Image (cartoon, grey):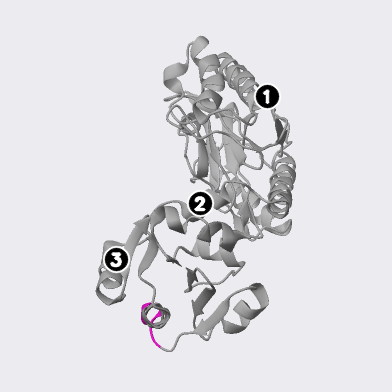
Amino acid sequence: MKLQQLRAQFDAHQIDAMLITNPINVSYLSGFTGDDSYILVTEKEAIFFTDSRYTEQVKHETTGFRLVERQSTLLEEVVREVKEQGIHHVGFEKEYVTYATFQLFDKYIDAQIVGVSGLIEKLRLIKTPEEITIIKAACRIVDKTFEHIISYIEPGMTELQVSNEMEHHMRKLGAKSSSFDTIVASGWRSALPHGTATDKIIATGDIVTLDFGALYNGYISDTTRTIAVGEPSAQLKEIYEIVLQAQIRGVEALKPGMTGIEADAVARDYITKHGYGEAFGHSTGHGIGREVHEAPALSHRSSYTLEAGMCVTCEPGIYIPEVGGVRIEDDILITETGHEVLTHAKKDLIIL
């Protein structure tokens, strides 16, 4: 089905074959979990190029591909196939190909090479039932990890200790790894939206932002919770309540037919109304799936229209330099009638 959907886009881009080199897209189309592989999709077949390290793995993980075990470079094998099949116009993923590689394509491939954008990413927008099942499992891992970590954190621990414990626990629950470098940002560092863990000591009275995700069977989850270790300041409590209400409203509004701009505005307008608009600098959300940041974006620049089968985050935040910050994030599936929240960890302020 995926290959047929890809071929259906050939005419619009005036190509008769597509060369896929981005490992994430190679894996998405084929199910292959290894490295150093290309796929060439023609109008009649799909060819999988790899080396002897992966040939048996390809046979077990993929179906519907003709396997070519390279005897030279991957490019040389592609060049040979293009020539033998009389292909005239080969599309390539222009976002993922370096200029040096483009020069090699241009020099050696005996066909017109055409840089195209988003053909496979367009397919990845709508998740299949099988993909949704995997993403839900990744979400259960982060929910259970949050339950674990709030019983683990104590004043005097470093952010890195907490981060390492979270990543270890996700692996214990079946994750291959974390989706990204786990963010544990405490005290003044919680005002850093992407403050990955450091050796800073978590002190009594600190607010702590935990932004983390699990990579499970090739798909990711991405959630954020903010907690307090000891009683936080009145200002931080106020900020927390504003972010919480903005996030709840942002999630509740999500539905098919809504644009990314409209989705972003719900939480943003609430925060702005309460006087903190300038302290919310990032987008409200983004798509998740094979990657932690993929389409559709929920931002003031996003013209994407939400459709059933898309998975997105909703993660408004407020960040006050030298004081602290709060972000709350859930993963959400857009459904035919509205949405389904996939992450369920407690969102009311937890004071440890």
Left or right: 98 as drawn, with respect to 16: left
How many residues crowd around disc 1 within 10 Å: few (fewer than 14), some, or many (20 or more)?
some
Magenta span:
72-76
Q: Secondary structure at mark 1?
A: helix
Report the residue at 57% width, 83% height from top. Answer: 55
Question: Main SS type for the magenta part?
Answer: helix
Q: Secondary structure at mark 3?
A: helix
For disc 1, the marked residue is 252
Mark 1 or 3: the one toward you: 3
Quadrant holding the C terminus: top right
Mark 3 or mark 2, earlier in chain: 3
Residue 154 horizontal/vertical position (percent): 66, 38
Which label number is shown at residue 121?
Answer: 2
Residue 66 horizontal/vertical position (percent): 56, 79
Residue 35 horizontal/vertical position (percent): 51, 72
Q: CA distance from mark 1 to mark 3?
A: 45 Å
